[in-house]
Image (tube, rainbow, N blue to C red):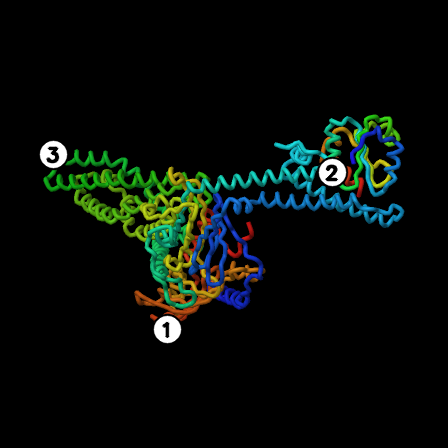
């Protein structure tokens, strides 16, 4: 009953959040939006998110959220040497200093020429105040110069003691103006040389989609590649219609959750000690794997190391006088079965145990904060993990054969009771080893399927930096442009076939025209979201129980539900409530769940649900359509895909809205 | 303007110090000194500053009070506001700050 209360409280809390926060839809004030303009060799470029609610500048090398139906446009601005020089911060500060010193020269001349009535005390004080004001401005000029150039260089410049000049120290403003003009000419020269060197540089814009479900792939960038343009498939904003990408995600997510639910049932059925709960899912899978390893390590190695001796013993027995042909054949068959086990042990179990030990050592080395980081880090344990998963797969495939073989050995031994001594029979197939071999086939496949499913997910998350290498063949379709006149690059995200939560990376690459050597690269990393009022589709692992009925129906059982929730995302939250709404991500919606509360093998239920953290945790109530009484059920659900995404946050980082970025 | 003592006399100086619309700085040293160069720079930067290169310290002993300074900084009045050592007079930032503080 405790959990039922918990579900009720969750639903009430989520409903409260929805009611309280739903009216918070205020967008940002009319503050100027931050701009993130990069420069390389006289070319300025800026990535713009052209969304339904406006245009936003996307900062490079940071992770931001962008609207899933926006266009991403990388705009280039080629500048002349003069424009380039004038755009440099140094150009601006030099001109500012020149203006400032001109004003000071005029003021000095005016004050020096002023006639003051020395008999008028007030007039003298007023004049002195004016002089003090000018003194403060002079101090500021010298301090600014000192901060920029150091006091020694400042003194040299003001004293007229710099290259090409031996000025009069009593004319510091003239000296400074001369030095500034020389510097401005130098900057222009530099800019001219830079612009000239741009003739030798090419630029390319690439985009990659990193979906939550599926493999990394290149996206078409208008003007920069010959990849297919893609079909127009905007992510539905509020309707119940599913895009193709959402359909394939949903199928995959349902499959993954189905496997997780089955693994939980298997664990519960075979290992009563392990209690099911949402929090410990990953721990339970780990525990199951540890338990398997322990079984194999404790009993099997000792038996396997003894097999050669046993086989020899059996063959020696077959040569004894007085042994019938039939018994000889049985003894030989037994020896062959054991040899097959011996080979399997050497080919499968021993390498699996070795690989598992290596992997555990790597993970326990403290080098990685969690499994996700271990997998995604540059020196990741991917290879080791791949080996373990591959060997587990082979073990799983072999286990039914072992079950049959163990049964055959047991029956052969029974027939050889009068020939093989009891102590030898015990050694041929010890009872515990027999139990392990017999149980593996029933015990393990669903756990393996769940591990495989999670691993497939991680395996598909290769870092994007490697994209250029992993997506071989893309390079042939790229179109490089000279830096003197690069066209704008456009990526139509509503043709990318992505869904909410997928990630896209846009990379701008500069390289030598001749040597093809990469000179400069800048990346923009984005996550797809839907802003404003929108709906999100997901599949959750749920724990459901009937509110009344038999004891079995009232047990919390793992199942799967497909959900649709409506949320509101504030693009430019300005205050506490807007930020809280975005953080809490409350939503309300409907679901279709598979259930296990009656006699039918397939049961479905439908109902309403409330969710927090954009679908991460869901609670709801529904009606089982497959039973005629005690139809009502409660459930608590978790979005496994989201959990895995958040588990990788340490290495992939959190995303914020492009509009919510602070100025650089 | 930058002048030298002598030919400017102590009486002349006394008269100049009476003018509250000017401030005065005395540099005791030689024309080639860095400290005198900085005095000329600051003279060129600020308005209403009179600077004197004192080649004969005896002429200004009334204002140096046996302190043997390199620089004597006056504000808007006839009394010295600050005495500068050689190191202070040869640090443009410190020197400028001393002059402007004396005038504030």
Which chain's residue wears label 2?
Answer: B
Are there few (<14), some (14-19), or many (20+) residues within 10 Å of tag 2?
Answer: many
Helix, strand or loop under label 2: helix
Mark drawn on residue B44: 2
Instruction: State the residue position of label 1.
Output: A629
Residue sitting at x 85%, y 49%: A123
Instruction: State the residue position of label 3.
Output: A321
- Residue in the foreground of this view, choosing between A573 and B61: B61
Callouts 2 and 3 in the same chain: no
Which chain's residue wears label 1?
Answer: A
Q: Viewer-nearest of labels 1 and 2?
A: 2
Q: Is residue A555 visible?
A: no
- Residue in the foreground of this view, choosing between A98 and A51: A98
Helix, strand or loop under label 1: loop
Residue A276, by quadrant, is bottom left
- Residue in the foreground of this view, choosing between B28 and A633: B28
**Could you tell which of marks 1 and 3 lies nearer the N-terminus?**
3
Quick one: which residue is furthest to the bottom in this view?
A628
Is A495 above or below relative to A375? below
Q: Viewer-nearest of labels 2 and 3?
A: 2
| In this rendering, position of residue B56 left or right of residue A384 | right
> Could you give the CA–CA distance between mark 2 and mark 3, rounded to whole angstroms?
126 Å
> Could you give the CA–CA distance between mark 1 and mark 2, rounded to whole angstroms?
100 Å
Helix, strand or loop under label 3: loop
Which percent across, then down, holds residue A122? 86, 50
Which percent across, then down, holds residue A115? 83, 46
Which chain's residue wears label 3?
Answer: A
């Amino acid at each position: 009953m405790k959990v039922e209360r918990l579900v009720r409280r969750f639903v009430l809390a989520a409903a409260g959040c929805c009611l309280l926060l739903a009216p918070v839809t205020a967008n940002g004030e009319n503050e100027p939006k931050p701009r993130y303009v990069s420069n390389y060799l006289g070319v300025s470029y800026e990535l713009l998110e052209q969304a339904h609610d406006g245009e936003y500048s996307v900062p490079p090398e940071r992770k931001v959220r962008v609207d899933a139906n926006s266009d991403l446009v990388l705009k280039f601005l080629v500048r002349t040497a003069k424009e380039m020089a004038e755009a440099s911060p140094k150009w601006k500060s030099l001109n500012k200093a020149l203006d400032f010193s001109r004003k000071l020269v005029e003021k000095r001349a005016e004050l020096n020429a002023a006639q003051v009535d020395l008999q008028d005390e007030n007039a003298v004080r007023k004049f002195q105040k004016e002089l003090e004001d000018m003194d403060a401005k002079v101090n500021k000029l010298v301090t600014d110069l000192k901060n920029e150039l150091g006091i020694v260089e400042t003194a040299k410049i003001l004293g007229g003691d710099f290259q090409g000049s031996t000025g009069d120290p009593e004319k510091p403003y003239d000296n400074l103006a001369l030095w500034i003009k020389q510097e401005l000419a130098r900057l222009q020269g530099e800019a001219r040389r830079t612009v000239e060197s741009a003739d030798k540089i090419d630029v390319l814009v690439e985009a990659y989609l990193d979906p939550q479900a599926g493999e990394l792939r290149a996206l078409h960038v208008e003007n920069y590649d010959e990849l297919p343009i893609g079909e127009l498939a905007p992510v539905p904003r509020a309707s119940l219609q599913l895009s193709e990408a959402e359909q394939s995600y949903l199928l995959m997510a349902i499959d993954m959750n189905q496997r997780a639910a089955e693994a939980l049932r298997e664990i519960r059925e075979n290992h009563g000690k392990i209690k099911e709960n949402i929090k410990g899912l990953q721990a339970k899978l780990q525990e199951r794997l540890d338990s398997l390893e322990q079984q194999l390590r404790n009993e099997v190695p000792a038996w396997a190391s003894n097999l050669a001796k046993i086989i020899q013993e059996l063959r020696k027995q077959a040569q004894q006088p007085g042994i019938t042909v039939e018994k000889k054949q049985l003894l030989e068959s037994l020896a062959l079965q054991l040899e097959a086990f011996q080979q399997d042990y050497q080919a499968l179990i021993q390498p699996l145990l070795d690989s598992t030990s290596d992997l555990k050592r790597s993970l326990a080395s403290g080098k990685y904060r969690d499994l996700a980081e271990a997998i995604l880090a540059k020196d990741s344990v991917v290879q080791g993990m791949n080996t373990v998963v591959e060997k587990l797969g082979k073990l799983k495939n072999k286990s039914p054969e072992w079950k049959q073989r163990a049964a055959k050995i047991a029956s052969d031994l029974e027939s050889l009771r009068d020939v093989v001594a009891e102590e030898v029979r015990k050694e041929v197939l010890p009872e515990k080893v027999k139990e392990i071999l017999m149980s593996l086939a029933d015990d393990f496949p669903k756990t393996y399927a769940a591990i495989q499913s999670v691993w497939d997910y991680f395996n598909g998350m290769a870092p994007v930096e490697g994209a250029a290498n992993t997506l071989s063949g893309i390079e042939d379709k790229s179109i490089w442009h000279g830096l003197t006149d690069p066209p704008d690059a456009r990526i139509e995200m509503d043709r990318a076939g992505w869904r909410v939560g997928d990630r896209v990376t846009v990379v701008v690459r500069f390289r030598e025209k001749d040597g093809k050597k990469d000179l400069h690269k800048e990346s923009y990393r984005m996550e797809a979201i839907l802003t404003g009022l929108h709906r999100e589709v997901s599949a959750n692992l749920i724990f459901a129980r009937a509110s009344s009925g038999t004891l079995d129906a009232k047990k919390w059982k793992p199942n799967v539900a497909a959900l649709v929730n409506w949320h509101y995302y504030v693009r430019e939250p300005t205050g506490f409530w807007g930020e809280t709404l975005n953080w809490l991500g409350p939503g309300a919606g409907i679901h279709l769940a598979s259930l296990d509360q009656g006699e039918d093998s397939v049961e479905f239920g439908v109902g309403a649900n409330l969710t927090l953290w954009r679908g991460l945790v869901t609670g709801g109530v529904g009606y089982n359509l497959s039973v005629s009484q005690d139809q009502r059920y409660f459930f608590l659900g978790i979005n496994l895909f989201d959990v895995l995404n958040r588990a990788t946050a340490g290495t992939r980082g959190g995303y914020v809205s492009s509009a919510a970025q602070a100025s650089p | 303007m930058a002048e030298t003592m002598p030919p400017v006399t102590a009486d002349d100086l006394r008269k100049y110090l009476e003018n509250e619309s000017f401030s005065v700085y005395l540099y005791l040293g030689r024309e080639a000194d860095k400290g005198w160069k900085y005095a000329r720079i600051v003279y060129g930067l600020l308005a209403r500053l009179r600077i004197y290169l004192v080649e004969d310290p005896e002429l200004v002993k009334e204002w140096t009070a046996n302190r043997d300074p390199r620089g004597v900084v006056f504000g808007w009045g006839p009394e010295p506001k600050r005495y500068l050592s050689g190191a202070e007079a040869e640090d443009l930032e410190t020197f400028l700050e001393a002059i402007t503080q004396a005038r504030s």
